[in-house]
């Protein structure tokens, strides 16, 4: 037992697994344990790590990393915030973020706690890059080009389509923020590829993009968690045109999301009570170590 | 006369000129005027713009952009800070930044004002990118590769060498943070190229890098204010290796520096009294507009 802040990982999917690794690798945090619906399932978790059905069974917890499906975040976060536990999530529904943030702000004020929303790579660090580009060149166009890589949201949509036994969708960048969707499906017995492809292309997740549907025998053999993005801006600084900026990442998707959440947990411990996105927190607060040492090394 | 915050540009070299443009282009700031040693020199400045020898002649000033040689900043900033005027500088001597920041912190506390130090592209926005890379992949190596582009500091060093009538130095990236220096010189009457080249290569600015000295007839015809950098990191998120990040900019150097200073002026108006680097300020504070609108657009 040491006096490092104690972090709970809530949910044990791809991101939860990686979050456990990232907390254990952090020099200044410790893992309080894992919270999951069925704590009797161990799934290869180190027997030394506590697994509980509720955060209350884990002793003092400073920050809860909510590694849950995004639609569960607005209901799950207040539970923690109102009992004084900071939360970090990677909520990724852009359209409702501002409203969710307002709701979590109220919970955080009640509990004297901090919520950090949308701490992932997009939204999250990519949002920070878009802001950085605008402060350097306020006029101009920014394009965010995703992939190539598997899109979680689109893959869920594919699997819900009639006639699809299993499947996933890969996002391929075409430039200027346009994307191709490569959809790989295992058909249900008796399903027709043409009819399934038509249904996928009519789905709101796919109807605005160039979409190709490919029949395969086994999805598991094709899945790779690599992903990436390129953000480009050509803009104007003052009255000077043709200022060029480009940011690129090629990464393991759940590992990066989890690492960003763990860095955000550290930042949560350094903010006044309230709800924040990563844009609203100084970069230095995400990093371990003393402020002067960080400034000497990074500035 | 409107009620936008009033910005003074102090110094009228390359960066000062661009700073005037960037303040005039900002939707939420206004130019109070220009402060320079000899206010009778107009150098093509719009006659409608006040030019003064002291900031006191410009009426109310909220923020002073210190577009001065970097070594003058530690003495110049306190003058403004102690009379309650926020300052922004692009101080770029990495080794002494933390000490200078402490001194400006004292002045800022006395005057109830805000100092933002090292607001340029390196140090400045490049420092923010280095921090961003570390929060995403805490273990690994970051390389900052500068150029190709003219280095101001190295050019000043060249012109101080015996036998050099005029000259400048271009930084060329070789990868892994190593750089070649291409030095273009006009020789003084009777000077020998070989002897001058030897003196340049022995200078502390050049002795650690691969340096080539080329004799030319006229420096003015060769100077271009374009510059750039590539920052690369390959690192580890949690326990996942080979996470790849790359950032590249190709820009007009004084225009970008000046724009970053103007964005920092806006941020200065939003901080509590004290001294800050860009790493210590939330990204959203550098941008004009309402917080909710920015979050809707950028997150």
Image (cartoon, coloured by chain):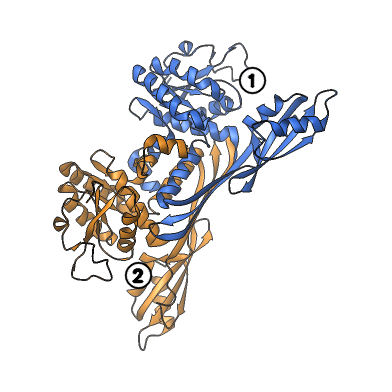
Chain colours: A orange, B blue
Q: Point out the residue furthest to the bottom here.
A: A190
Out of A67 and B137, give the one closest to the viewer: B137
Q: Where is residue A106 in the image (x, y as percent from the top left)?
A: 19, 44
Q: In this view, does B138 lie to the left or right of B24?
A: left
Q: Position of residue A196 (x, y in %)?
A: 40, 79
Q: Who's the residue at 27% across and 64% down the image?
A: A12
Mark 1 nearby-residue class (10 Å; few <14, some 14–19, many ≥20)? few
Q: Who's the residue at 58% across and 17% down the image?
A: B47
Out of A50 and A164, give the one closest to the viewer: A50
Q: Who's the residue at 35% across and 88% down the image?
A: A189
In this rendering, do the residues under marks 2 and 1 share a single chain? Answer: no
In the depicted structure, whether residue B3 falls above or below residue B230: above
| Quadrant of the image occupied by residue A218 | bottom left
Answer whether residue A34 is visible to the viewer in this image.
yes
Which chain does the residue under circle 2 lie in?
A
In the depicted structure, whether residue A284 falls above or below residue B110: below
Out of A270 and B81, give the one closest to the viewer: A270
Residue bearing mark 2: A157
Which chain does the residue under circle 1 lie in?
B
In the depicted structure, whether residue A245 falls above or below residue B87: below
- Tell me the CA gap for discs 2 and 1: 62 Å
Of helix, strand and loop, which one carries label 2?
helix
In the picture, the disc for residue A226 is: none
Of helix, strand and loop, which one carries label 1?
loop
Q: Position of residue B289 (x, y in %)?
A: 39, 37
Answer whether residue A138 is visible to the viewer in this image.
no
In the depicted structure, whether residue B297 falls above or below residue B25: below
Q: In this view, does A222 lie to the left or right of B219?
A: left
Q: Where is residue B184 in the image (x, y as percent from the top left)?
A: 75, 34
Q: Who's the residue at 55% across and 35% down the image?
A: B256
Residue bearing mark 1: B44
Mark 2 nearby-residue class (10 Å; few <14, some 14–19, many ≥20)? some
């Amino acid at each position: 037992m040491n006096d490092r802040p104690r972090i709970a990982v809530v949910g044990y999917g791809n991101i939860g697994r990686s979050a456990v690794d990232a907390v254990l690798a952090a020099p200044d945090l410790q893992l309080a344990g894992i919270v999951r619906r069925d704590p009797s399932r161990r799934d290869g978790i180190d027997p030394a790590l506590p697994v509980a059905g509720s955060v209350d069974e884990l002793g003092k917890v400073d920050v809860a990393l909510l590694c849950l499906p995004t639609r569960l975040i607005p209901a799950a976060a207040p539970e923690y915030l109102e009992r004084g536990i900071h939360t970090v999530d990677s909520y990724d529904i852009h359209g409702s973020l501002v409203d969710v943030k307002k709701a979590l702000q109220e919970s955080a004020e009640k509990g004297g706690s901090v919520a950090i929303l949308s701490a992932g790579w997009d939204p999250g660090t990519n949002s920070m890059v878009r802001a950085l580009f605008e402060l350097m060149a306020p006029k101009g166009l920014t394009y965010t080009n995703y992939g190539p890589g598997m899109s979680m949201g689109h893959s869920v949509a594919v699997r819900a389509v009639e006639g699809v036994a299993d499947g996933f969708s890969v996002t391929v960048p075409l430039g200027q923020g346009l994307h191709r969707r490569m959809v790989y499906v295992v058909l249900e017995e008796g399903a027709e590829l043409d009819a399934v492809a038509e249904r996928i292309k009519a789905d709101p997740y796919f109807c605005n993009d160039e979409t190709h549907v490919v029949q395969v025998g086994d999805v598991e053999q094709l899945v790779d968690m690599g992903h990436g993005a390129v953000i480009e801006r050509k803009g104007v600084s003052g009255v000077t045109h043709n200022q060029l900026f480009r940011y690129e990442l090629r990464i393991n998707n759940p590992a990066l999301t989890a690492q960003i959440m763990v860095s955000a947990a550290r930042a949560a411990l350094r903010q006044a009570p309230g709800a924040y996105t990563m844009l609203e927190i100084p970069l230095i607060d995400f990093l371990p170590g003393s402020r002067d040492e960080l400034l000497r090394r990074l500035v």
